[in-house]
Image: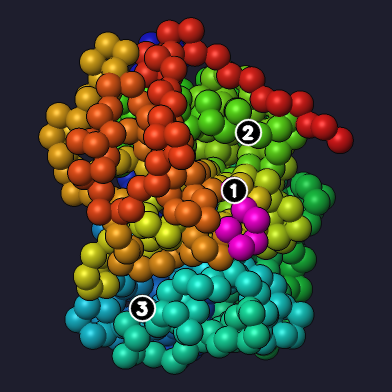
Amino acid sequence: MNMFTRIALLAHIAKWRLTWKRGDTLKAYAVPGNPKFMSARDAAVLIRDGDVVAFSGLGGNQRASIMFWAIRQRFEETGSPRDLTLMAIGGIGSRGRAPGTLEELGQSGLARRFFTGHFETFKAMLRLADAGQMELQCLPQGTMALLIDAQGRGEDSIVSRTGVGTFIDPRVGRGTPVDDEVGEQWVSAEGDSLRYRMPKIHVAVFNLPAADRKGNLYAKNCAIIGESLHIAKAAKRNGGVVIANVGLVVDEGYDEIVLPGDMVDAVVVFSGTEQVGSVPHRKYWPLFTTHSDISASEGIKRLKYVNWILGYTPRRRSVDEALARLATSLFAEHEFEGALVNIGIGLPEEVCRLLAKAGLVDHLTLFTESGVVGGIPAPGVFFGAAVAPREITTSVEVFQRCYRRLDVSILGVLQADSDGNVNVSKRGEGAINYVGPGGFMDFTTAASTIYFVSSWMAGGRIEMAGDRVRVVERGRPKFVQAVDEITFNGRQALALGKRVFFITHVGVFRLTEGGMELMKVMPGIDIQKDILDVASMRVVLPESGEVPVVDASVVTGEGFRLALRPRAD
């Protein structure tokens, strides 16, 4: 990436930060003879007190900011709409850091109930919950997508093995309410599965790139489609309202129509409507589309630079690079060309980066839960989009594909325990520390092989010393006797024949019938002092007592090579 590109990106970020609060909710784009084109404030009037309102998006992608502002402003001025139930399968908040996210609706009295799979970015809602002013309901992200699809067909529930043996299974944990003393239960046991329900959607609100003057909607040059089409179908099936926020008005025939005008009740045109966070549809970045104008590697460099400038994502150290190489080498050792692979957020993104650097992504199909397939999943604040994707479909379609066949999922960890159970949903006490599972439960249910990539400790300090790894200062153990909340059930996974690995800074563990077996150790790590004396988790050693030491090239990167096995069809 050259100096001129860096300067252009800096200017882009500066302009975004200076203008990111701008949006006239009273301004309307008028189309003679079509009253469906209206201001955001007029569209907000279509939302009634007590409605169930569903939104589409993931991370910084597909934010309908002008509608979030309009709904909040109308409530502040009139007290309506109030007592809403909000639904969003992905984390389209900002942790309170940026305007124009769904957190705009985190106002006491405006919303009383919130359904999502990933809570961590919605700090406004979490604070309301801790104050006793909002009910939080948790559903696995993919399961929620499939429930939306079912509503569009007139069905009110689905049966799934997703979540069996975890906190969401009422035989094991609390079920869907985040506070088990507050709110209705939306999941029940049914044999060896679970039956999920959710309230009927009355209003769908989403962002797509363009509409023509008849109100037909187009997805051309979008970064994601998300749940847009399915929440619209569900709302119409339930006799409700569809509100589309677009960035462009185009001529009929602009592209394939993704939602016809007779399915849309309001079209809100706002020039600042974004393709992804900071990038408006009217000046979209081709790198997020199926016709990218730059290479995937160059696109990733640009996005990592933007993330670095914004400071929204962790700064990785050399020891994290070694961890990523360890995970990637294990992946290459076990996986085949042509595998369908899900990449989670955080340290798994570093594995994805190395796969791309080695040229292996051309021999795999990577995807994200938003429905973007192929290419390289975008990092940091752009997570949910991809660089140079091969296909952009809906989140419902991509989860349906996963349940038909998912070869690999690479995911993060908050805690793991002696039985291979994993917690990614509960960081601490109180709603403000609740994360939620996101798509984690769906992916671990669907995947044949699961790689959990995690730091060995929370805090503490692990450093590189030449071709060796050293624990300099102990932190809080992440590998414990029993996790605080079961988001993944290790014994259930083994019973279903899944392969499960845990890759850490100190080495690799494999989940076996006997427990968590240390199968590889990083050079420089003292098994007794750095592993057995640190983790309260029960560690199983090989029968021989000898644990293979990871090759030094994994630590240093010198001479490090990767190659996938050809698929034996």
Q: Residue 264's quadrant in the figure?
A: bottom right
215 part of magenta stretch: no
Up the image or down, 504 lies above or below 60; here it is above
498 part of magenta stretch: yes
Residues at discs 1 and 2 in contact (Cβ within 8 Å): yes
Disc number placed over residue 294 in the picture, else none: none
Residues at discs 3 and 1 in contact (Cβ within 8 Å): no
Q: Is residue 20 left or right of residue 195?
A: left
The residue singled out by tag 3 in the image is 178
Gap between marks 3 and 1, in whole Å? Answer: 30 Å
Q: Position of residue 419 (x, y in %)?
A: 42, 60
Determine the residue located farthest toward the top in the rendered image.
559
Q: Residues within 10 Å of mark 2 (few under 14, many from 20)?
A: few
Task: Write the start and end of the magenta stretch as one range.
Answer: 494-499
Gap between marks 2 and 3, in whole Å? Answer: 37 Å
Which dot, 3 or 1, sits closer to the camera? 1
Q: Position of residue 472 (x, y in %)?
A: 15, 29
- Type of residue at label 3? Val
Q: Residues within 10 Å of mark 3 (few under 14, many from 20)?
A: many
The residue singled out by tag 2 in the image is 334
- Type of residue at label 2? His
Disc 1 element: strand
Up the image or down, 362 lies above or below 199; here it is above
The residue singled out by tag 1 in the image is 499
Q: Residue 480's quadrant in the figure?
A: bottom left
